[in-house]
Amino acid sequence: MSDVQSSTPEPFDLDAYLRRIGWEGGREPGLATLRAVHLAHSFSLPFENLDALSGTAPSLAPADLMAKMVRGRRGGYCYEHNSLLACALDALGFEVSGLAARVVLGADSPQSRPRTHMMLRVGVPDEPRPYLADVGFGATGALLLPVPLVLGAEFEDAGRRHRFARLPHGGPLELWALEAYDGASARWVAQYAFTLEPFTAADFEVFNWHVSTHPRSPFTRRAYLQKATAERHVALDGARFTESRADGTVTERTLTDEAEARRVADEEFGIEVPQGLNLLV
């Protein structure tokens, strides 16, 4: 069992998960399978924070993730997405451990942000280096494919470009940063910073509760939805709906009322908004 899952056995239905993400290929625990499952998950399951917006810490138990994200018309945020992916990769035979990062996008320094983002370190048979997998970073700089944990190389993943940089800091462990290439500004932009220290399910339960209940957490204050496809990335941040296309075109508009917001959540993100929850708070 992956160390990012609960120690209490919970049902996980690999067949149902693979149907949900539309993957019908092989199940051998190799690099091709890891890349295919990661990409299919990224394009199929939306990012959303509606539980936190309603004042509830979402459950990370595999059975609850299955009910919400696989059998229901919902998505989740990083802890849910990457916990669900960890279940799938574990069932497929990969070695999986959790990593935790400080989101530095828009920050003055890595030290100004707490560790609030979850990713996965994945060991792949016959591969000399582990891979970073992350299907839960709700931004246009997110990974669409897993990338090897190696410095000094640039990776193209489904039309996006990423690389790892090493950041100076005063700690005993190396501090890595995932950087994404921003074509509009023609520069590399750090997304999050992390060490390779493994984190467990107990750690992520604490992080999850803090992020979903703290009054200053952005996830408790406004709706944030996102979904990626090969052609475009759509996001709803409060009342602002943004579409970023693969050719670099970006369009924005402001939603006017709750009925329109619910319609956008359904049609653009495939999300069924719970009754009684207002998206435009």
Image (cartoon, rainbow, N blue to C red):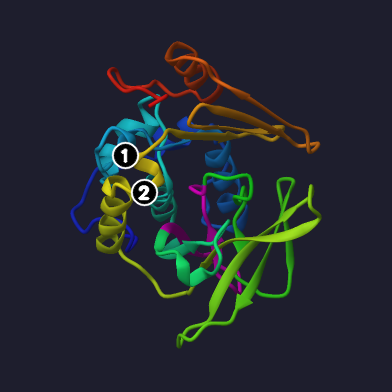
Classed neighbour count for the residue bearing mark 2: other residues with Cα under 10 Å, few (<14), some (14–19), many (≥20): some
In the image, 113 versus 151, the foreground residue is 113
Residue in the image at 31% along x and 39% along y:
52
Task: Give the left or right position of residue 148, taking residue 117 as reference.
Answer: right
For the N terminus, the image quarter is bottom left
Query: On the image, numbered disc 2 is attached to which residue?
Result: 217
Q: Amino acid at mark 1?
A: Ala
Residue in the image at 42% along x and 57% along y:
118
Classed neighbour count for the residue bearing mark 1: other residues with Cα under 10 Å, few (<14), some (14–19), many (≥20): many
Query: On the image, numbered disc 1 is attached to which residue?
Result: 52
In the image, 278 versus 179, the foreground residue is 278
Q: Is residue 198 above or below residue 225?
A: below
Task: Give the left or right position of residue 101, taking residue 4 as reference.
Answer: right
In the image, 24 versus 231, the foreground residue is 231
Instruction: Find residue 184 and name its label.
Output: none
Residue in the image at 79% along x and 52% along y:
185
User: Magenta includes 128?
Assistant: yes
Query: Are dots 1 and 2 in contact, CB under 8 Å?
Result: yes
Give the magenta part as a residue range.
117-137
Task: Give the distance between the C-alpha atoms of the residues marked 1 and 2, in whole angstroms.
Answer: 9 Å
* Residue 106 found in image quarter: bottom right
Q: Position of residue 62 (x, y in %)?
A: 29, 44
For the C terminus, the image quarter is top left
* Residue 181 found in image quarter: bottom right
Task: Give the left or right position of residue 70, taking residue 215 as reference.
Answer: right
Q: Residue furthest top?
A: 259
